[in-house]
Image (cartoon, grey):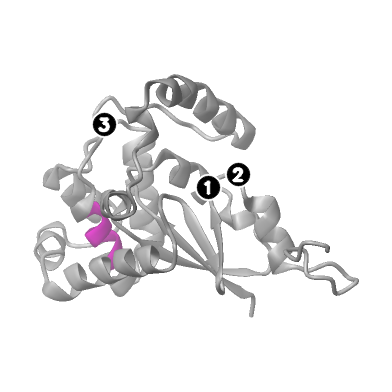
Amino acid sequence: MGKKLEFFYDYVSVYSYLADSQLKTLDGADIVYRPMLLGAVMQATGNRPPGTVEAKRRYLHADIANWARRYALPLTMNPLFPQNTLNALRLALLAQREGTFSEVHRRLFDAMWVEQRNLGDDSVLATIAGEAGLDPDASMQAISEQSIKDQLKANTDEAIARGAFGAPTFFLGDRMFFGNDRFDFIREAIRPSISGRDPMTVAD
């Protein structure tokens, strides 16, 4: 058994898309996927999407392109942005319950960041559900169940309570790591040095 690494994310987050592609490189970690509503997290913490800050927006495109090249990952900026991913996140939670998460998860990220589709369109979500082996009509009804709604709210509220302010956010126990560029620190935390020294401890 590896160490539990919780991955809080939203499909609307391009850095979550980038980070998701690298999770398979984390030896010794058991990934727990925790969909959360990023807009609610930002609202609760007073954060702002980087695209709403002009200087950040100009930098963002170059930074994303650099990371996509680093990971050899297909990426096309979606002109339909921002999007309402509420039902997409609920579909991911349903897929976890139905045992088809990996298929739905990958299709949702690809739809947003490769295929330029609208995750706020229920017909797009129904198609994705069908592609992943779920019944499209039954799935779109199921994501409106109170248990699914409650689970997404619980994930989001928990992320906020634990200190999250954006996505992607990772938790290894009570340690939080934010962003696509924190994998070196996560690896060190998963596998402490042979000397036994905790790599997260700052020397006096």
Q: Position of residue 197 (x, y in %)?
A: 84, 71
Q: Marks 2 and 1: CB-CB under 8 Å?
A: yes
Residue at image mark 3: 81
**Lower sequence index among marks 3 and 1:** 3
Q: Residue at x 75, y 68 (%)?
A: 191
Residue at image mark 1: 179
Residue at image mark 2: 181
Measure the alpha-carbon separation of dots 2 and 1: 5 Å
Label 2: element kind: loop
**Front residue of 134 and 93:** 93
Q: Residue at x 55, y 32 (%)?
A: 68
3 or 1: mark nearer the eye:
1
Q: Quadrant of the C terminus?
A: bottom right
Measure the alpha-carbon separation of dots 2 and 3: 23 Å
Total count of labels: 3
Mark 2: few/some/many CA within 10 Å (<14, 14-19, 20+): some
Residue 33 image-quadrant placement: bottom left
Q: Marks 2 and 3: CB-CB under 8 Å?
A: no
Q: Position of residue 118 (x, y in %)?
A: 21, 37
> Residue type at mark 2?
Asp
Label 3: element kind: loop
User: What segment carries the magenta color?
Assistant: 88-93
Measure the alpha-carbon separation of dots 3 and 1: 20 Å
